Each structure stands twice: as C-alpha cells, then as structure tokens.
Amino acid sequence: MEQWLTEIAPWLAQNDIFTPATLAQYWQGLVNTVQLVFISLLIGVVLAVPLAIARGSKYPWVKWPIWFYTYVFRGTPLLIQLYLAYYGFAFIPGIQDTWMWFFIDDPTYPALLAFTLNTAAYTTEIFRGAIKATPRGEIEAARAYGMSKVLAYRRIILPSAFRRALPAYGNEVIFMLHASAIASVVTIMDLTGAAYYVYARFFSPFPAFIFVALIYMVLSFAIQGGFRQLEKHLLRHLQPSS
C-alpha cells in the first residue's frame, strides 16, 4: 500500500481531496469492512445450518425458540440491534467489573455480534426453505440405500439444499455488505466512516461518498460474479450437453 501511494504521489500532490492520508484512510476502511462482513457471514452460516435443521423439528420446544429468534432479528432493524449490542450491554449493572467489558468496550465486538446474529437469522430461514424444498424422491432414494437420517442429511439433503439456497444466500451476502455501512455509527472506521472523515476534513460530500459508493459497487459486482461462477459449477450437471 505504501509503495502504491509513493508511485502516485505526484498526482496526489495536485489533488486537494485524494491525498496519501485520505487514501490510506479509505484503505483502512475497506479492510475493516471486509473483515467485519466476512467474519459475520462465516460465523452466521456455521450457526444457521444446525438452526435450519432444528427449525424443521417436530418437537415444539426445539423449533419454536428458533422461530422466535429468527422472527425478532428479521423483524427489527439492524441499526437498532447494533445500538442495543453496543450501548445496551454497557448499562447492565456490574458488567464493567467482569471480563465481558473487554469485548463491550471495543465497538468491533458488539458490531460483530449484531451482524452475526442478524445474518444467521436470515440464513437460517433461507436454508430451512431450501431443506424443506428437497424433492421427496431424493429422500426416498436415500432411505432405499439404507442411509440413516444423519447420513442422508450429510450426503443428500444438505448438498441439494445448499445448491437451491445459493442464489438467495448470494443476495444475503450483498445485503450484509451494504448493511455494514452502519458500523460507523458506533465509531468503527469502515468505508462509510472513512467517507465521513474526508467529508469533515474537506467539506466535499460528493467526492467522498461517491468514491465509497463506487467501492461498494465494485465489491458487489465481484460477489455477484463469484456466486454466478459457483452456481455454474454446482449446477453444471443440469446444463444440456452440447
């Protein structure tokens, strides 16, 4: 990054807004945004798979708590969830004297918690619908081969459901990327926070926020392209042979 800034230093010297300092700020915001979104999605999908399976349980004491969790987190704004995670826990009596205060005092962890729980709720419902849509013939074929329920889920149901859930999950990934723009409200220097920094310093909202919008667009198109290639790879057996 420093070498790249050195190479374009002559051009930056003639520019009032895009200076080495502001570009370094944008770069740090990009890194923070990608890290926050990636970790949230990774933990969220790990949580969502068992929750989606349990959501389809025939036992009410198993499925209804999961339904309530997904209903709450899909029915309330992510911004409110972020505020509650960052500001709300700090008002719990005595929490400042516990080990939890280390995580609450740093805005990264409350933001990670809010984003993870939010995306896990949406992903749970995406996977639940995909599992529920598994063709009956595939399940009966697994039973005919003598597979146990666990083995059928591992070899037949979950891989099939993942392929069906991929388009919807791709939209969820892009949604989380765009939703991460609110992380700056709890003092995280993400891409939007970097734009606020440039705007406050140079009083030029259009260059600052349009530049960030272009970065979000590039990231979104890259994610779309990645999921499109993944869909072609996983669904290549359904393509007509030439």
Image: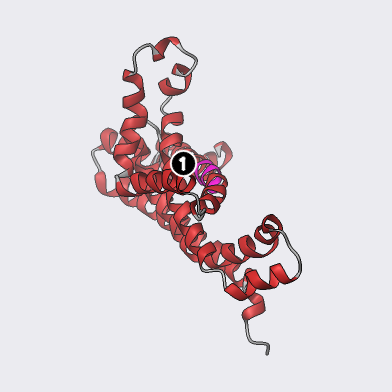
- Quadrant where the image shows the C terminus: bottom right
Can residue 198 be seen by looking at this rendering?
no
Image point (57%, 64%), residue name = 161
SS state under label 1: helix
Q: Is residue 229 above or below residue 18?
A: below
Can residue 142 be seen by looking at this rendering?
yes
- In the image, residue 235 lies at what x, y percent? 62, 73
Q: Is residue 166 above or below residue 5?
A: below
- In the image, residue 187 lies at what x, y percent? 35, 29
Q: Residue 236's quadrant in the figure?
A: bottom right
**Is 146 or 18 nearer to us in this picture?**
146
Which residue in the structure is indicated by mark 1? 116
Magenta stretch: helix, strand or loop mostly: helix
- In the image, residue 238 lies at what x, y percent? 63, 80
Describe the colour scheme in one phrase: secondary structure
Question: Is residue 42 shown in magenta?
Answer: yes
Question: Is residue 144 shown in magenta?
Answer: no
Q: Residue 80's quadrant in the figure?
A: top left
Report the residue that reaches farthest toward the bottom.
Answer: 242
Q: Is residue 4 above or below residue 111?
A: below
Magenta-highlighted residues? 39-45
Image point (32%, 31%), residue name = 84
Residue type marked 1: Thr
